[in-house]
Image (cartoon, helix red, strand yellow):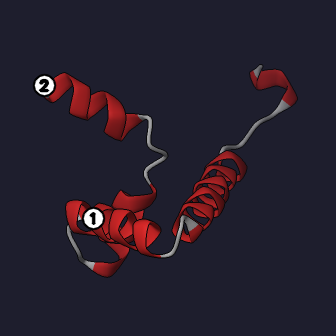
């Protein structure tokens, strides 16, 4: 069961863990808030989650230095 949890957390973009680290809140609590608010508001936090995941991925990609001769 632990490997399932690890696989899901690894492939879940890291948005909740990033927000938890920045705000000092546990990752599980942030995930529960995303679930509850998405049920109450008919899925609008999912849109925020996808935008945040795209933004974090873009930041990670731009921070990597890619040069022509590194390929």
Q: For numbered disc 2, what is the local secondary structure?
A: loop
Of the 4 image quadrants, the one containing the C terminus is: top right
Residue 17 found in image quarter: bottom left
Q: For numbered disc 1, what is the local secondary structure?
A: helix
For residue 32, the mark is: 1
Residue drawn at the location 32% of the way across and 80% of the way down: 23
Q: Residue furthest left?
A: 1
Residue drawn at the location 49% of the way across and 46% of the way down: 13
Pinpoint residue 34: horizontal percent, then vertical percent.
39, 66
Residue 1 placement, left or right of 27: left
Q: Nearer the viewer, residue 24 or 9?
A: 9
Residue wearing tag 2 = 1
**Does 5 appear above or below 62?**
above
Pinpoint residue 49: horizontal percent, then vertical percent.
54, 61
Pinpoint residue 39: horizontal percent, then vertical percent.
42, 66
Point out the tag, 2 or 1, that comes first from the N-terminus: 2
Residue drawn at the location 53% of the way across and 68% of the way down: 42
Q: What crowding class fits label 2: few (fewer than 14 Cα within 10 Å), some (14-19), or many (20 or more)?
A: few
């Amino acid at each position: 069961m632990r490997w399932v949890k690890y696989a899901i957390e690894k492939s879940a973009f890291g948005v909740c863990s990033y927000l938890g680290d920045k705000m000092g809140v546990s990752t599980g609590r942030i995930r529960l808030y995303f679930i509850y608010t998405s049920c109450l508001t008919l899925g609008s936090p999912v849109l925020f989650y996808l935008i945040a995941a795209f933004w974090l991925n873009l930041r990670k990609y731009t921070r990597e230095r890619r040069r022509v001769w590194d390929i």
